[in-house]
Image (cartoon, grey):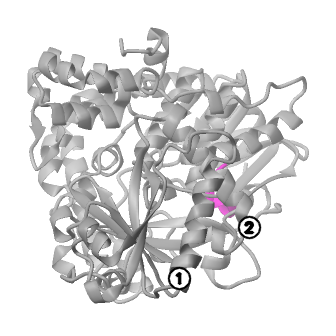
Amino acid sequence: MAVGEPENEVNRSRLGPAERTAALDLIGSGEEFDVVVVGGGIVGAGVALDAATRGLSVALVEVRDFASGTSSRSSKLIHGGLRYLEQRDFELVREALTERGLLLGRIAPHLVKPVPFVFPMTHHVWERAYIGAGVALYDGMSLSMGRDRGVPHHRHLTRTQALRVAPSLRRDAFVGAIQYWDAQVDDARYVMMVLRTAAAYGARIVSRAQAVGFLREGERVTGVRIRDLEADRELDVRAKQVVNATGVWTDDIQELVGGRGQIHVRASKGVHLVVPRDRIHSSSGVILRTEKSVLFVIPWGRHWIIGTTDTAWDLDKVHPAASKADIDYVLEHVNAVLNVPLTHDDVEGVYAGLRPLLSGESEETSKLSREHVVAHPVPGLVVIAGGKYTTYRVMAKDAVDAVAHGLDGKVPGSCTDQIALVGGNGFQALWNARHRLAESSGLHVARIEHLLRRYGTLIEDLLTLIEERPDLGKPLEGADDYLRAEVVYAASHEGARHLNDVLTRRTRISIETWDRGVGAARQAAELVAPELGWSKEQTEREIEYYHKRVEAERDSQAQVDDQEADATRRGAPEIVPTASPEVS
């Protein structure tokens, strides 16, 4: 049993094959849920947890893997949005900074950690005063709610001081700098932990289940018809209230009720590059102004994540493609301040994600709203859209408040600001004991730290697995940052259904290795196969699909524009058939 976690909570948080089957059996049994959530990204996961901790019966369905859309392809930052201060969006910044403090200190200390950034300046007096005032306000707002901000205070640096922190910066590219702190997270991993916490409180969670229509009595929505894509069967899930939390797919789901709704979402593409840590010498991240937005250089283990772009996208939303033009844009802007420029040969990984932006008057996606909106377009249906990753909990609270309004009887208020995610309770004590854990487990303390930052107190599950099967304590071939046990655990406890889920979201092997995970694919598939009951043929099919996916992504990133990149990326087959939406 993990330190600080009730045994029944640990067991109930498991999202393995047996739990998926049991959830499908229950939700298709005719039982009426208080809430059914459509969408397994960060907002849908947050809604499921908020509702479950208010005592409501909850089911959540996701058409692909959890966090397979926007919520695994972000900049992986938990931040207030420093640039929104310049737009005078003070309330959004204050809200986000409050959430940052909660996540760092109470909700997910095992998953969210502080990260420093250097902001190079190009003008001597006015820019230091202007940016300095903004960062001071940023720090001050993080304390305005009476909570510890969880990160150090900013500091002003001369050019010489900044070069000590970030020696890779070009001396002639700036005159001074300010260093400030925000926080970062593995976005897909965080979603999975929110879902596991929701499951621990009774929510039924199912991936690879597509909403193909709504059940209705007259005008009222009374549930969702889903198609289990793994078994190609349809089930009716009855509900008193349904929440559409599908991000960039919001309008598509609205079409299932005739397109009637007050919310319209547009997609903005953001592209990130991953390069080895030794290509940029710095002990801090870097933030740069661009003509459109900002560019981050973010420390990420043995790597840097560099991004992002901000361009309108109206092509394939499932697999947004990064083009050569996108990669060139990021390299051009980061090279403007580096003394040794990066080239395409330095890029280990590339990923593209779509931001769900509320449509406005402007044609520029960077000016569309990041505020979130909740609507009740028809009785029995709540829609939540917009917002940013950092404020997911507030979005979820607002959505469940709307659900509560549509339910008979009194529903308690949100309490998720008081609840740690699974693996969080007792984390600090276990972190302090990491050397003892290393000695007792036989693993190097660096491995223990890696596991603690990914699993928190649930590390005990992994250590028990390794004790039972010592071979799982060895590194995965082709991706030695990860242990074999992590691959097995991804399938047995974390809801991974396919090899791509393991290499792309439960781990980040697909963007952290030069071959993008191809070398690790076979051993990973063979480790997962017994957990998921794969035949030899299915195992080979999973490996083949993964190879083709990587090949299509690489080819798309050599194309000159979005249209060609999109067409090339679509060339890879889907591992499971995707059903066509049908109105019930």
Residue closer to the observer: 112 or 324? 112
Residue 546, compared with residue 308, is above or below; it is: above
**SS of the residue under disc 1:** helix
**Residue to which mark 2 is pinned:** 264
Residue 534 visible? The answer is no
Residue closer to the observer: 395 or 440? 440
Amino acid at the residue labelled 1? Glu
**Image side of residue 243 versus residue 304, left or right:** right
Magenta segment's dominant SS is: helix
**SS of the residue under disc 2:** loop
Residue 435, compared with residue 508, is above or below; it is: above
Which of the marked residues, 1 or 2, is nearer the chain's N terminus? 1
For label 1, count other residues whose C-alpha is less than 10 Å away and answer few (under 14), some (14-19) or many (20+).
some
**Residue to which mark 1 is pinned:** 127
Residue 138 on image: x %, y %: 60, 60
Mark-to-mark CA distance, 1 and 2: 38 Å
Residue 41 on image: x %, y %: 54, 48
Residue 181 on image: x %, y %: 45, 56
Q: Residue at x 18, y 47 (%)?
A: 540
Q: Place residue 296 in its image quadrant.
A: bottom left
Q: Residue at x 9, y 33 (%)?
A: 474
